[in-house]
Amino acid sequence: MVHNYWSDWYFGWGWMLWFGFVFLIFSGIGNWGYTYRAHQKYDLPPRKEASDILNERYARGDITREQYVQLKSDIAVA
């Protein structure tokens, strides 16, 4: 009687090994994709708030003190 080891491997518990390999490959790709997107999202420069932009404009001299006070109160209300 000839014993075929390959048939025991594929039809026994060997399919779980292959399933595990495929699962590891897909989970590794998924983890890479998730971390890639997360780093793209958080590596962007922070958004400037309206008050920061207003302070910069006042510091550069683009607007007067009266305009600064008026715009600052408008921002606080909004």
Image (cartoon, rainbow, N blue to C red):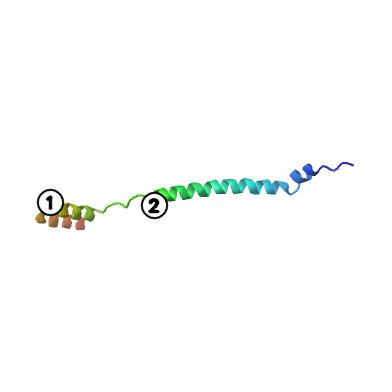
Residue 65 location, quadrant: bottom left
Q: With 22 as the anchor, is 73 left or right in this view? A: left
Tell me what residue is drawn at x 16 percent, y 55 percent.
59
Position in image of residue 15 (x %, y %): 70, 46
Position in image of residue 27 (x %, y %): 56, 49
Position in image of residue 74 (x %, y %): 17, 55
Residue in the foreground of this view, choosing between 66 and 75 = 66
**Residue 6 to residue 72: above or below:** above
Circle 2 Cα neighbour tier, 10 Å, few/some/many (<14 / 14–19 / ≥20):
few
Question: According to the image, label 2 marks what residue?
Answer: 42
| Structural distance between the alpha carbons of marks 1 and 2 | 33 Å
Tell me what residue is drawn at x 10 percent, y 53 percent.
64
The secondary structure type at the circle numbered 2 is: helix
Question: According to the image, label 1 marks what residue?
Answer: 63
Residue in the foreground of this view, choosing between 5 and 16 = 5
Quarter of the figure that contains the C terminus: bottom left
Q: Amino acid at mark 1?
A: Ile
Q: Amino acid at mark 2?
A: Tyr
